[in-house]
Image: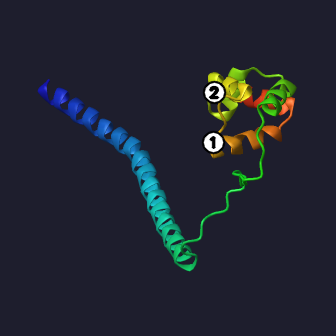
Amino acid sequence: MANIAFVLKEEITRLARKEIRQETEVLKKASAQYRSEIASLKRQTTNLEKQLKRIEKIIPNQKPIDESKPEVSSNIRFTAKGFKTLRQRLGISAADTGRLLGVSGQTVYAWETGSSRPRKQQMANIIKLRALGKKEVEALLLANA
C-alpha cells in the first residue's frame, strides 16, 4: 500500500511541476518583452537628450517666443470709466472680472472708482480681456469654475 501512495504522490508532483512550468513560461516571455521595450525606450531617451544638448549648443541664450504675453507699452491708457464700461459690456460681475484677471473683486472695484490703478502685469491681462467677447468670457469662467 505504501508503494501506491508513493507512486501517486510522485505523479501528482510531476503533473504540478509541468503545469507550473507552462504557466511561468508565459510570464517569462512577457517579462523578456517588457525588458526589451524598456531598453528600447532608454536608448530613445538617451538619443533625444543628446539631440536636445546639440540644439542647445547651436542656439544658446535664445529665449523662446511667447505670443501669449502681449507687450505692454507706455501708451496704453487706463480709465476707470472705460474699465467699468468694459465689465458691463461683457456682462460679468466685479468678482468674475477679478477671477479672470487674477485679482480680487475688491481690487476691481478700486480700479473702477479710480482709487487705484492696475500694475503692468494686470494691464497685460486687461488688454487680453478687451479682445474677448461675451461668449468667450463665459467659456473662460466656466472653465475656471
Residue under the image location 65 percent in, 23 percent down: 105
Q: Could you say whether the residue bearing mark 2 is in a helix, strand or loop?
A: helix
> Which of these two is toward me, 99 or 136?
99
Chosen colour scheme: rainbow
Q: Residue at x 56, y 79 (%)?
A: 58
Find numbered disc 1 in the image and state the secondary structure of the residue it sits on.
Answer: loop
Taking 27 as reference, is 47 left or right? right
Q: Residue furthest bottom?
A: 58
| Residue 38, image quadrant | bottom left
Query: Relative to residue 133, is residue 31 depicted above or below?
Result: below
What's the residue at 69%, 23% (across, down)?
A: 109
Measuring from the top left, give residue 137's x and y in whole percent.
Answer: 79, 31
Q: Quadrant of residue 122?
A: top right
Task: State left or right for residue 37 relative to residue 123.
Answer: left
Amino acid at circle 1:
Arg
Total marks drawn? Answer: 2
Q: Is residue 145 visible?
A: no
Residue 107 badge: 2
Q: From the image, tell me which residue sits under label 1.
A: 119
* Mark carried by residue 128: none
Q: Are marks 2 and 1 in contact (CB under 8 Å)?
A: no
Q: In this view of the protein, which residue sits in the foreground, 111 or 128? A: 111
Q: Please tell me which of labels 2 and 1 falls first in the chain.
A: 2
